[in-house]
Amino acid sequence: MWLSSHNISKQFDWLLYDQVQQFSQLPAANDIVIVNIDEKSIATLGRWPWPRDKHAQLITQLQQAGAKAIAFDIIFADSDSNNPEADLAFAQAIADHGKVLLPLYIKQISLQGQVLEVPPAPLFYRAAHSIGHVHVAPNEDGVVRSLFLKEGVNSAYWPHLSLALWQMLAGPQPLPGSQQAAANTTSQQQYIIRDFHNFLPMPGPQQGLRHVSYSDVINAEVDSSLLKHSLVFVGASAAGLGDTITTPIGTMNGVEFNAWAFHALRNGVLIQQLNRTTLIICHSISVFILLLILGRLSPRAFLTATLLSIIGLVTISALLQLQAQLWLAISPIIIALLAFYPLWSWRRLEVALHYLCQEMNDLESSPITTALAISANKKPSTKAKGSELVSQTINRLKQLRNIAQTNQRLMQKSLEQLNDAVIISNTSGRIILSNQAFAEMISPTEQQQQDLYAALSNIELQNYNWPSVINDLQINSPAFALQGTHKHSGKDLFCQGHVAAINSSHNDTFIISITDVSQLKAAEKSRIEALNFLSHDLRSPMVSVLAIIEQQQKHTNPQQQALANIALLVQKNLSYAESFLQLNRAEAITHEQLHLCDLHSVFDSAQTQAIALAHSKNINIITQRSNEDAWVLGDNNLLERALINLLSNAIKYSPANSKVSLSLIAEDEQLLLQVCDQGCGINADELPTLFDRYTRAKQHQHEMGSGLGLHFVATVAHKHQGQIEVSSQLGEGSCFTLKLPKANPV
């Protein structure tokens, strides 16, 4: 809000803040004692400034009385060249006590506003436990309501005296207050950097700190029990010596202000202020909500509610300040509420009703609205219910809104029923509407859900690019139909696009539909491969059979070799057909057809058949199995066939008198069937395509086979939610592992 961002109403906020502070109350400060350099001390000890040995004597007396810590609110910037012994005594007393804090100040050193940090003299600086600044931050009206816990020239390095004392007693602590406060831009303080800004709560009217005279302490006239374990602040209160600070509850001297600041800091009751951005947001939201509520009321209720809102805001602000230590400036909200009443009344009577009535008349006369109303069994009425013009207008608007919502639901439901992804956007590329199929098919990011060009960037067109296609669509308005591929999933997509005029006489809307044709492409590829297989691999053995028969017809006695060749070719053909049928069966099985299978049974059956196959080559089948139950959800025949395929391949491509291992391994969530041989191995560059249809390793081309066996194994693994893996080394052999998820037999 403008009032919040420019601090126009801060004087009113400060007035409210000061009034609330009259009711502030701090915890009792029984351990804080202020040693005043008052008129009595001046009269007793002489004119100010005193020799530093007086301060040394004070520290000694306080140490003997058992004071826990001493904080001086007196500047010791220079050494006393006339009395160096007094300086040495003071420094020694500081060091002996061990918990004495000294202040520094920042002074202007030129007319241009240059400033300089002035710490205590080096002798005292080294002896002191900590150094802290004692600057305050008065507002424009001269009242000190806050302080900065960190301050310095060009860097907010120095802690406030109260913070230095707190950290000395409690160790490093997280600092309260708003950080990175803006530097003071006045000519005198333009190089002062301040941080951790906090407002100081004031003590109650009956609260006070214990005060003793400086001279009484020096002369041991103060009861030592008063000083034992106390936190002592030393400062001037005599007229003309100490600094007097104006606060929301009146004036107090600087040392007392610092003492109360320390007390509030250690009790965690410093008041925080919202940063400007948060305050503006809070004001905006508050005004918006209040105006939204108040604007719905009648004028009389509106006025009453406005006054109650102002009283409530003041009460909330006061409670936050007193109970939650949070200052919320509310004057911008109050000013906005007071200004809103007449403005809203005028606008509601002169503008809103006229505009709404005119719009209602235009909408009710629209053919589209009439058609939708008829389809929904509703009829727009120019005489809506309500005795007041506002009520009538609102009721008419509700009727039209219901019709519009019906239209929107109809469009959305229609789009959601489509299997194709549909994107509707304006010509600048901002997506207006899309359906669920778009999200599932394209998997767009948050940006791609809003930007057409970003969404289409996931699709790679064949021989085209999207910027030229969309540009041509916008300029020439031709519908397009192009094929593309999803860059991440590899899906084959068919994209169609049209341009239409929705909101104006010229084309302003793109309508893009995307169809997933991956299954159609895959089916077409399978059909072509099947035809190639049938036309070549199944036809070739039959042609050879006919050739042998024709050759033998020329002889009176059939030769035994000819019959053997015929048998081999027929066996090969039958093997091809069987592999093809088994693969089709594996591809057609669904999850609902799976049942519990015992892999031990599959293991035993495959082992029995493998021993028979291995006998002719004197290959030793070595088995190893887990003792655990091995249940999976699957098809027993397909799993057995897949394992036999792996074993038969291992036997076929292994040399005679070698070994083939068959293992059943149980892991945490998986069961593994593993077949390893000692064959010639497979080239590493052939492994990625080893499980593709009709694929065979180059070194195995001389062996009889269809190239469907391993593809069948991979298909079975996929249908059972499993995996097939292979590792191979040339000259050492191969190892195939079929991984299947465990099933619970209960």
Image (tube, helix red, strand yellow):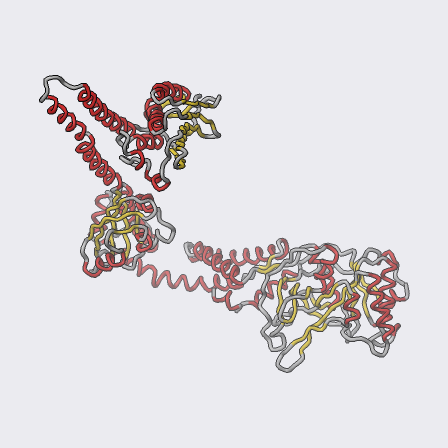
- Whether residue 158 is situated above or below residue 654 in the rendered picture: below
Q: Nearer the viewer, residue 219 or 331?
A: 219
Q: Quadrant of residue 350?
A: bottom left
Residue 19: x percent and y percent? 63, 62
The answer to whether 108 is drawn above or below residue 444 in the figure is below
Question: Which residue occupies the foreground of this view, 542 or 139?
Answer: 542
Q: What residue lies at 46% left-to-right and 64% top-to-bottom?
A: 339
Residue 299, image x, y percentages: 42, 58
One can see residue 418 in this view:
no
Q: How far from the left and from the top, in percent, is residue 133?
A: 70, 67
Q: Is residue 741 visible?
A: yes
Disc tally is 0
Position of 76 relative to 587 (above/below): below
The one nearer the camera, 114 or 744, is 744
State the quadrant of the C terminus. Answer: top left
Q: Residue placed at 46% from the left, 23% from the top?
A: 625
Tell me which residue sits at (36%, 31%) in the image. Answer: 717
Would you say 200 lies left or right of 715 here?
Answer: right
Instruction: Say which residue appears at 82% left-offset and 55% top-offset.
Output: 229
| Camera-nearest residue between 155 and 461 | 461
Q: Position of residue 147 (x, y in %)?
A: 65, 65
Outermost residue to the bottom: 111
Residue 362 relative to residue 109: left or right: left
Snapshot quadrant of residue 565: top left
Query: Residue 34 sits in which quadrant?
Result: bottom right
